[in-house]
Image: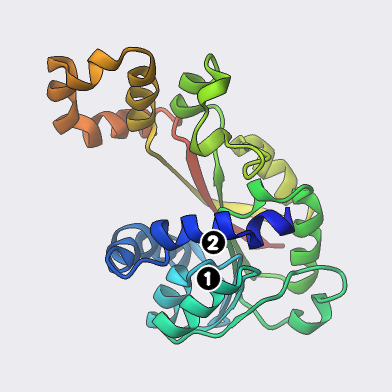
């Protein structure tokens, strides 16, 4: 897995998707700012320190910094770590959280975030154990992971040769129900204070169907549905069938 994330293929793809000056401001404003604000709203920690594990190109760190947090990011991909430092002026270390590094970070961070991290690691419980050893009572853990059941995953399950995003092996190894997250976090000394479900399910469902019925991509049906995509996604979100979940948990 470590080799995959350091690979040229992964790096070049992320230059287009994330380390891209033409879209980075949009992503910060429209994608990461609402998530960080949600985390701050539901955090009860008095410490204004934020550690982002798997920080990527530093989008979340830039928002946390703008809210007055002292920040640090951990990111193994060299290109992303360098981009974050240059673009946002945040400190990023090419480091992992493990039993060998826990002592370096213990007691320092009122907020620890892992946006789109746990689904990528072979043993999510292991990293949660290490993170819980860093934090103390009242500290905040922010986790975003792919959610199941969701319309995205259920629309792709009948077509395993065409899975995308949420069920993309070997990069996504796990999907998480809210109940499973609650159980895992409780095991490591956390309780969930707030959960936010959202996603791109309607888009994913239409895209998957379009692979098998190409005429749909030019159809009046798609033309009629496309302007309503946000409203239709809101219905999915309101029924807890979104493909992403963001939880804010408290160390107890």
Q: Is residue 119 above or below residue 78?
A: above
* Identity of the residue drawn at 83% across and 81% down: 103
Q: Is residue 142 above or below residue 109?
A: above
Q: CA distance from mark 1 to mark 2?
A: 8 Å
Task: Bin the neighbour count of mark 2 within 10 Å (Cα to Cα): few under 14, some 14-19, many 20 and up.
Answer: some
Q: Disc 1 on helix, strand or loop?
A: helix
Q: Which residue is mark 1?
A: 80
Q: What is the basis of the colouring in this image?
A: rainbow
Q: Which residue is mark 2?
A: 11
Q: Is residue 187 left or right of residue 93?
A: right
Task: Bin the neighbour count of mark 1 within 10 Å (Cα to Cα): few under 14, some 14-19, many 20 and up.
Answer: many
* Identity of the residue drawn at 41% across and 56% down: 17
Image spot of residue 78 (x, y percent): 60, 73
* Identity of the residue drawn at 76% across and 79% down: 106
Marks 1 and 2 close (CB-CB < 8 Å): yes
Q: Is residue 214 above or below residue 56?
A: above
* Identity of the residue drawn at 81% across and 59% down: 129
> Is residue 143 visible in the rendered structure shown here?
no
Image spot of residue 29 (x, y percent): 29, 65
Q: Is residue 68 left or right of residue 169?
A: left
Front-most of 238 and 102?
102
Image spot of residue 217 (x, y percent): 23, 22
């Amino acid at each position: 897995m470590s080799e995959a994330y350091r690979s040229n293929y992964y790096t070049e793809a992320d230059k287009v998707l994330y380390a891209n000056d033409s879209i980075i401001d949009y992503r910060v404003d429209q994608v990461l700012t609402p998530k960080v604000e949600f985390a701050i709203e539901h955090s009860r920690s008095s410490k204004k320190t934020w550690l982002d594990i798997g920080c990527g190109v530093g989008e979340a760190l830039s928002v946390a910094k703008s809210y007055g947090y002292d920040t640090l990011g951990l990111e193994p991909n060299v290109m992303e770590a360098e981009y974050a430092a240059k673009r946002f002026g945040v400190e990023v270390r090419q480091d992992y959280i493990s039993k060998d590094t826990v002592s370096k970070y213990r007691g320092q961070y009122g907020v620890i975030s892992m946006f789109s991290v746990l689904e990528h690691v072979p043993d999510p419980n292991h990293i949660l154990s290490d993170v819980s050893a860093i934090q103390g009572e009242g500290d905040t853990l922010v986790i975003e992971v792919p959610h199941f059941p969701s319309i995205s995953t259920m629309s792709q399950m009948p077509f395993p040769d065409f899975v995308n995003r949420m069920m993309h092996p070997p990069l996504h190894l796990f999907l998480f129900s809210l109940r499973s997250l609650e159980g895992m976090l409780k095991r490591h000394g956390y309780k969930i204070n707030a959960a936010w479900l959202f996603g791109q399910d309607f888009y994913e469902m239409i895209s998957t169907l379009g692979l098998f019925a190409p005429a749909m991509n030019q159809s009046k049906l798609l033309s009629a549905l496309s302007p309503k995509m946000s409203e239709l996604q809101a219905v999915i979100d309101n029924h807890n069938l979104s493909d992403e979940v963001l939880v804010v948990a408290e160390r107890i």
